Each structure stands twice: as C-alpha cells, then as structure tokens.
Amino acid sequence: MPEAVLQARGIDKSYGPVKALRSVDFELRGHEIHGLMGENGSGKSTLLKILAGQLAPDAGAVYLDGEPIAFGDAADALAAGIATVTQETTLVPELSVAENILLGPRKPKRWWGIDWRRTRSTAVEMLGRLQLDIDPSVPAGSLRPEQQQMVEITRALSMDARVVILDEPTSSLPDDQVAALFEVVRALRDNGVAVAFVSHRFNEIFDLVDHVSVLRDGQLVGGGPIGEYDRASLVHQMIGQELENLTFETRATEHADPVLRVRDFNVPGRVHGVDLAVERGEIVGVAGLVGSGRSALLDGLFGLEADAYGEVDLDGVEGVASDPRAAMNRGFGYVPADRKTLGAVMDMSIRENLLMAQTADRMRVGRPPRGSEREACTATIERFRIVTPNQDNAVKNLSGGNQQKVVLAKWIATQPKVLMLDEPTRGVDVGAKAEIYKLLNQIKEEDVAILVSSSESEELLLLCDTILVMHRGRLAATLSREEATDSKIAYYGMGHG
Amino acid sequence: MNNGSTLTMMRQFATRRFFAVLVLFVLLFAYFAITQDKFLTSGNIDALLTGSSILWMVSIGLTFVMLTGGFDLSLGSVMAMSGIAMATFMNKWGVPLGIGIVLTVLFGLLVGALVNGVLIGKVGLPFLVVTLGTLTLYGGIVNLWSKGATEAIVSKDLTSIAFNHALGIPVPAWIMIGVFLIALYVQRSTYFGRDVYAVGGSPDAARLSGIRVTRVLIAVYGIAGLLAALAGVMQVARIGAASPQVGGQIIFSAAAAVLLGGTSFSGGVGGVGGTIIGVLLLGTLENGLSVSGVQSYWQQIITGVILIAVVVLDRVQTVGWANAFRFARRPPSAPSATAPPPAAAGSQS
C-alpha cells in the first residue's frame, strides 16, 4: 500500500453548539482516488476545508508528508501542493486558458514583463499531459463548464500539486462530460497524485474511486476498498438505515385529453419545433445533455424567453406566455434549476418564500393575514417535512434538500395545472431525494400534470410515465416508461437517433 | 418552539449591525448628557430632533431604494428642486399652503417614479448612471428655474411647521414620527414591503414568483422622491425661503445613516427601524459636538471613522477576528458578481 501523503488525526471541529466533526482520522495516499461519502451536513465540506488547510480544527492536526500544516488561505495550500477544485470555478473568465493555468507561477522575463511564449508552451505541455483538446489561447470564460474544471485541474497539475481535492465537481455536468473529466482524474492518479473525490452520484463513486470513507453526523463510520461495497451497503452506512426501495405506479396514457399541448415550439437558437403533451396526473420527463434545450424549453413555456413562439394550449388557454405572471395565471408553476438565485430568495424567511408566488396577485398595499399565514405554513412545513426550528428561519440556513422542498411547496401552493421542474434534486442528498420523489408522486395523484427536466436518467426512469429525449434543441425520441432505459436515453441524447 | 424562536430572534438581533449602532448612540447620548450641561435641556433636544428632520426624511426614502439593491444619488437635487417648485406653486400660482405642500410632495413622487423609476425599473439602466445623470440634470434645472436666487415664501403657518410645538413636542418631530410609522407599516405589514425585500434579495427569483419587479422599482424611487420633496418642504419652512443651495451633501449623510442602520448596498436586508437609529446617532454627534464647541470638521471625521469601524465590526462578527483583515475572505453575505452561483448546495456542514 502506498504511503499516506496527507493525514488528518483526531480532528474535532464545532460551529457554536454544532459539532461538525468528532475525532476524525483520515488519510489520502498517492496513486489513489479516495471517495468521501456522506449526506449533506455530515461534515464532508468541513473535513475537506481542514485538509486543504483553509480551516483550523479545534483539536487534532493535519500532516503533509508527516509535517504538521496550518495554512491561512488557498494560496498557502496551493504553494504546499494541495489544490481544491469545486464546481464553482475560480478561473478568470476574461483571461486566456494559458494565462489562467499559469496565473500563480507566472513566467517572468529577466527584467520585466512576462514571457508569453514560455507561458503558452508550458500550458500546451500541461494540457497535453492530461490529453486535453483545449486551445490555450481562447478566453477561459468561453469554455464549457467541464472544460473549465479541467483547466483548473491542469492548473493544479502545473503547480505540482500532490493532493487534489475534488468537491462535487460533477454536480452540474451531463454524463458525457463527466466521463471526460474522469479520464483526467485517472490521469492525475496515474501521475502519482493523491485525489479526494466527493459526489452524490453513486454510479460515479463506483466508477471512479479506489477507496471510500463514509462520514455520518461528523464521525467516520466506515471505509475501505470500493470493492468491499455495493450500493445498498454504502447507502446504509451513509444514512444509518436501509433506504426503502422506491417504485411508483405508472399510468398508461393515451394523450387523448392532455391538459398541456405544445406544438412546434421554438426558442430561436435553442429549441426547434418541439411537440409535447402532458395529461392530468402524468409525469413527463425531458432528458438530454446540458445545452440540449431542456431548460430553454421550460423557460420558454414559463415566459422567460422573450422570443419564444409556437402553439401552446393549457387547458383551453392558447398562446405563449409573455412573462412569468402570465404563465402563472394560465396555471403553470416552475421550480427552476438554480434555487439560490431563481428558486427562492435566500435571505427571506421560509414563510415569506412559501407565500411569495401564491400572494403575487394580491393588492400590494394589502396587509398579509399573519395568523392564517402562520397556520398554513406550519401545515406546509409538516406536510413537506421541512426540517427547521421555525418558519421565520431564513431559507439560506436550510440544507439543500430542505431548500428545494420550500421551492416545491411554494409552487404547489399556487395549485398549478402544470408543474414544471428543472433538475429537481440537484445538490440534494439521498434521503431528501427520496422524499422529493414521493412528494412529486403525491402531487401526481392530485391530478397535476408534471413536466420534469433532468440530467439524471435514473431519476427520470423512476418518476416518469413518458420520457422525451432532446438533442440540440430538437426532440430526438419519445419513450414510454416500459421502453425507456438508461442506455436508450444516453443513445438518443448523444444524437444517434 | 416559542422559547426557541425567541432565542434565535435575540441572537439574530444581537448580531445585527444596528444593535451595535444603537449601543453606540446610547453611549454617545449619555456621554454628552453627562459632560455637557447644555446638552440635555429641552431646548437642545428639540434642536437635535428638528435638526435631524431633513436627514430623517431623505434617509427613510433611501432605505427603500437600498433595500431593493439600488441607490439614488439625485435625492439632494430633488429636495432642492422641490423647494423651488413649492416657491413657484405658492408665490406664482398663489395656491394656499396646504395645497402647496401636497403639490410639492406629488411633484417629488412623480419626478422620482417617472424619471429614475422608469429608467431603472422599466428600461433597465444601471441605477448609479441614471441617478448620477438626474443629480446633475436637476442641479442644473434648480439653478435655471430659481435664476440662482433664494426666494422667500412668506407664510406664518409655514414657519409654525418648523418651530411650533404641539403637546410639548416640536411639530417636525411629530411629522418625523408619523413618516416613520407609515414607512415601518409599509415595510413590515404590506405585500409591497415583502416585494421590496424579495427584489433586493434576488430580482430574478422575485420575477419568477410573479412579483412585478418593474412596478416595485418604480414605487421605491417614487417613495424616495416623495420623501426628498417632503424634506424640501421642511427645509423651506426652516429658513422661510426656497434656496437653490440646499441638499448638496445630504445624500452622503443619508447613505451613512442607512448603512449604520444595517441596510446594505447589496439589498434585501435591513430596514427603516435601523435607519432612524443611524440618523439619531449622526444627529446626536453633530449636536453634541457643536454644544461642546468642537469644530464641525470633527463631526465629519468622526462620522467617517464610525462608519468604517461599524463595517469592520460587521466583518468580525461574520468571520472572526483572525480572518477579518484578510483580503481573500469575502463575508458570506457578499454575492460575487461573476462566479456562477453554486447550483448544488453542496455539503455546508
């Protein structure tokens, strides 16, 4: 077994009364990809920050090659050879790829200025080592998200990083780009780097990592070579109990009397001639890569795309909604993918968020009825099992899953005829995912038509009665639940159809 | 749950900037009361209150604008222009005082809503550029309209607004209390008040929830214009004349008062309750120092120091002393303009 590069011993960390980590021992070895698993709030991020030297533990110490470390910030950690890559990139979008890669270790000329030729050639060499086909002279901002992450990894490599921490790098990437990213991560490992990897997607974990450690409530509850685990045992260790096996009934639908009928719908440049229909009490899924027009389709139906056109008929009301209010008045509800800037107002209370859409058409000088609002919110919080000390709590203080439940509850309160959701469980942990699926199924029972767009085909296969696959803005396939499989979705999604 | 939520609320309260400013205000007030014989006389307290009345109006209006994440540089010019407008209404048109005041306040409302409000809320131009433009524009109009001269408005009733007492309390103080209570009601107990916070917190989320963001923005710039005009009326009442010279620096004091009160430039947090504490602190400082016979330059210096100290204290409360002076650590409340928002909540443990 290779030697430990980075070691943490007896780490304790508290935030006020909350114990985030309790005497955790953890180590990363060279030539190894180490998966760190745990639900949101289990202490993963805290541990990674401590490992990267960005956060000081209350007790215990971190050793790099046996030497204790204490860093003040990311620059110190980088200088020592520890690089962190998250899905939020730290590239400067206006600078070129080469400049970004060599942003820290610039190539100065002898007296003044920067040796651009050497900068470029070093960047080319580094990109080559990871076999990346990226032009070093284009601005970093023009790259796709996964390419930007690869540039960050390249940068880490160019600084001779010996430890690379990947904190949920894949959560906003579609499958084919994830595969490309994994190739790079494996190349890193083969170069001798110690890699820590965090993801909520189990297939990624089993696909990529060599060794796994599981955190629960701030304690290390297990770990070992990935070969000793299967999905069920890993989930069991993460949540401390068996996850019930979810299956939902499907409805064979004829689309004889759909509540939503869309014909030849277009968003110039992004969605081309899409037809679809959703029955009451049906869940229709939209699969496809990022950029396939899935999100633009939902945005367009909700009145967020000014130049969208086509035939839309929602329960007898025709025409494309011109703005979100118009869409709401027709009976649309929309849970957008980005809950932090679009789904909820993070600084406002749970109650104010829950009521925001429902009360949007009240007289603005009117006075909200405090008592009945409180009662209604208490009931909603109970029904959706939102974990919070009280309804005055700001949404930003909730975990991802609970935030998403607030957004979902907000739209259900408007009693929509058609509820649209984009990436309904992005950044949500296993337990909350199952709850959100159950809630969607309940709403379906109440005869709401549901249109779900997702990059996780597992999710669509579980939930949907019908799955539409989009490729480059067009409908590539329509699959019933019976005929849909993971590989068919991937096949049509790549444009082979 | 009751106990728990009271405790959380107290904790939130204690970490708010305005609590620190409230303590500072009380200490400063006590200091002047103890060290200066002339400070705690009823005449001087009246002077402190009436002296703060103009800043009070402008700051409350500015609070609504800043809660939406905007700013209005033009309020000083609107205030001066409203005074000149009032002189025109009363001296040229000969309208009685009551109607003159109503017309002036409506004038401020329309100017704020139709120019700043429409350009920012409807057309979508950046607020700093728009209000810098209107600041200069209105400044020019003020001088052209008044021909650069101060115009007296002779009215006994007008003077009494500035200097009389009712039930032992100066009339301007009654107006201040009334305006504050109305503003507090609008902010806390109407759907519009919620809209203001929602638009400041996240304009896109607000729009997606069906809130008419354009109308909210037009309304807040209208409110700011209205209160600036009311400040203009009170200014005219105090000096008995409409002067083109007034309002030049008021926006800086108002911004300081709003920031001290806990409302931030990024919007969505704070409120008028904090703002009035900020105004009272600045008013006490000015009054107390002048009673002490200290040069007025010191007031500017101390105001500046307090403002910076309070913002530093904010930072210390969010990130702790050790990290407070590191450039790399942004406080979590500051949203970054360029980085894409983390779509996954990740594992914030």
Image (cartoon, coloured by chain):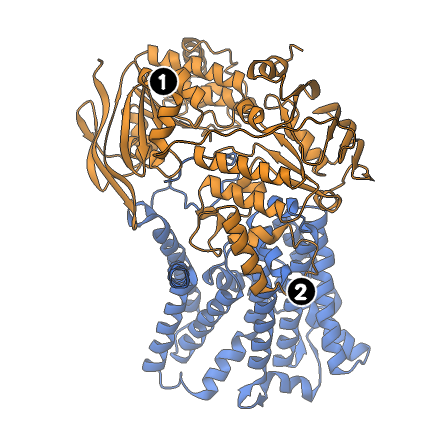
Chain colours: A orange, B blue
A226 on left or right of B155: left
Determine whether A110 is above or below A75 in the image. Answer: above
Determine whether A97 is above or below A371 in the image. Answer: above
B247 on left or right of B295: right
Is the C-beta separation of discs 2 and 1 under 8 Å?
no
Q: Quadrant of residue A50?
A: top left
Question: Residue drawn at (64%, 80%), measured in percent from left and top?
Answer: B237
Q: Amino acid at mark 1?
A: Val
SS at badge 2: loop
- Where does the C terminus of chain A fall, quadrant-wise? top right
Q: Callout 1: residue from which chain?
A: A
Residue A98 position within the rendered picture, expressed as x and y whole percent measured from the top left: 46, 18
Question: Residue drawn at (57%, 66%), measured in percent from left and top?
Answer: B60
Determine whether A169 is above or below A304 in the image. Answer: above
**What residue does disc 2 label?**
A366
Q: Residues within 10 Å of mark 1 (few under 14, many from 20)?
A: many
The answer to whether tags 2 and 1 share a subunit is yes
Q: Quadrant of residue B104?
A: bottom right
How far is mark 2 from mark 1, CA to CA? 57 Å
Residue B177 position within the rendered picture, expressed as x and y whole percent measured from the top left: 56, 77
Question: Residue drawn at (50%, 15%), measured in percent from left and top?
Answer: A136
Q: Residues within 10 Å of mark 2 (few under 14, many from 20)?
A: few
Q: Residue lying furthest bottom in this view?
A: B167
Q: Callout 2: residue from which chain?
A: A
**What residue does disc 1 label?**
A209
Q: Amino acid at mark 2?
A: Gly
Answer with mark 2 or mark 1, whichever residue precedes in sequence: 1
A97 on left or right of B125: left
